[in-house]
Image (cartoon, rainbow, N blue to C red):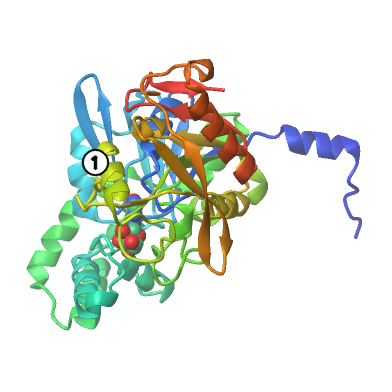
Amino acid sequence: MDYVKITPTTIKSETMANKADLIVGIQWGDEGKGKIVDLLAQQYDFVARYQGGHNAGHTIVLGGKKYALHIIPSGVLNPKAINIIGNGTVICPDAFIEEAAQFGDLSGRLFISKNAHLILGCHIALDQAKEARLGEKKIGTTGRGIGTAYADKVARVGVRVGDLADREGVIEAILSRYEQLCQIAPPKAEIASAVARWAEKLLAFAADTTQMLWKALDEGKKILLEGAQGTLLDLDHGAYPFVTSSNTIAAGACSGAGLAPKEIGRVIGITKAYCTRVGNGPFATEQENSIGDRLREKGEEFGTSTGRARRCGWFDAPLAKFACRLNGADELALMKLDVFDGFEKIQACVDYADGEPVYKTFAGWDKVAKARSFGDLPKAAQNYVAAIEELVGVKITLISTGADRNDTIYR
Ligand code: IMP
């Protein structure tokens, strides 16, 4: 057999091929991906989610109206974008139906992979019961049945969106999941009526989303892959077991949306200027003191999905560097720099010695809020940004100085 020789021509056509761009949180989630996706979504023809479920949450304010997004991609607010919920996600049908209802008719603008798995009531009940049993050692899940639904997927007993087409079969499958996981199942009639509702609302959107994305790439359409949660919650690369049950990193988009690694183009990492974490697990730079309280209050660090208070602490450069390497981040968006306004001094972890963070102290500043250009930033803020860039080794191309779309500095 003849092997295809790699010549300068083949290399050239390869690099010119259309690729999908990707947004990924490089901390523990809640980095402000919502604002970035909202800013960028306007430029994309397709926006696709590839992992996670309705544990994710962001609020977008548009024309004075507030929208809560959990599983539906952020492109839904761009009337021209097509939104994809990929095969790597898990979908709670009733939560999806409620979320979709905010947007009126979505036909032709939203597609759900037939292979995405369903989160059932038994998954939610089991997730919550497991956490209750763990007591002090609990993971601090969102209680949305994410891990238990993915466990069924991996064990090859899960129920998929496409399965809803076979009413009788899916009712039996769901009954069996309840019996195995909770030892007790709701009456069959109750499941049958839920299945009828889900089939009506979900099958209308069901599609082979992998083929759709391939076709879009081939036609030169612009695709944005929207990561949920964050790199440090990745099932394989986070601090197990204090992780979520999916691969949140850029590579997760390949399996979770059906794209080849070489089809991923620009990777944009999102980080806050400090760190937050919701749920349990290691957090070396956490400030369980007045600094943490101040960050929480100024940064309004309360969960969008669960309302829980987020743990807050200083920026962790070694972790950010690790996360950027894992994702192959080409650039970084630095969010919430304005939260430091009024801080006399700011610290950032620059290294670890014997497992303990080594901090560098930076001068604080009065106000960056609403700054629209890098030159508008106080010198101390410019220094902080430059130091993070240097420590992490990735260019910061966007700085957010407020919640509004316009409070953004492009570099
Ligand atoms: P699960 O994803 O609900 O199983 O929760 C596992 C861990 O991930 C917990 O620490 C959650 O708080 C955290 N987590 C899950 N989704 C998000 C998110 O969207 N933002 C931040 N943390 C999250």
Question: Is residue 379 left or right of 114 when viewed as pictured?
Answer: right
Picture coordinates of residue 357, whole percent (x, y): 51, 59
Question: Is residue 11 left or right of 311 when viewed as pictured?
Answer: right
The residue type indicated by label 1 comes to Glu
Instruction: State which image quarter holds ligand 1.
Output: bottom left
Question: Is residue 399 left or right of 342 when viewed as pictured?
Answer: right
> What's the residue at 61%, 44% (across, down)?
391
Quadrant (top left, top right, bottom left, bottom right) of the N terminus: bottom right
Could you tell me if residue 106 is visible in this image?
Answer: yes
Question: Is residue 351 left or right of 148 when viewed as pictured?
Answer: right
Quadrant (top left, top right, bottom left, bottom right) of the C terminus: top right
Quadrant in the rendering for residue 389: top right
Mark 1 sits on what residue? 297
Determine crowd level at label 1: few under 14, some 14-19, many 20+ residues with C-alpha closer than 10 A: some
Of the pair 278 and 264, the residue shown nearer to us: 278
> What's the residue at 50%, 28% (across, down)?
380
Picture coordinates of residue 258, whole percent (x, y): 54, 51
> What's the residue at 21%, 68% (across, down)?
171
Quadrant in the rendering for residue 263: top right
Picture coordinates of residue 392, whole percent (x, y): 60, 45
Question: How many numbered discs?
Answer: 1
Could you tell me if residue 176 is visible in this image?
Answer: no
Above or below, 90 relative to 63: below
Above or below, 170 relative to 261: below
Instruction: Give the SS element for disc 1.
Output: helix
Picture coordinates of residue 402, whole percent (x, y): 35, 26
> What's the residue at 56%, 40% (across, down)?
388
Above or below, 60 relative to 140: above
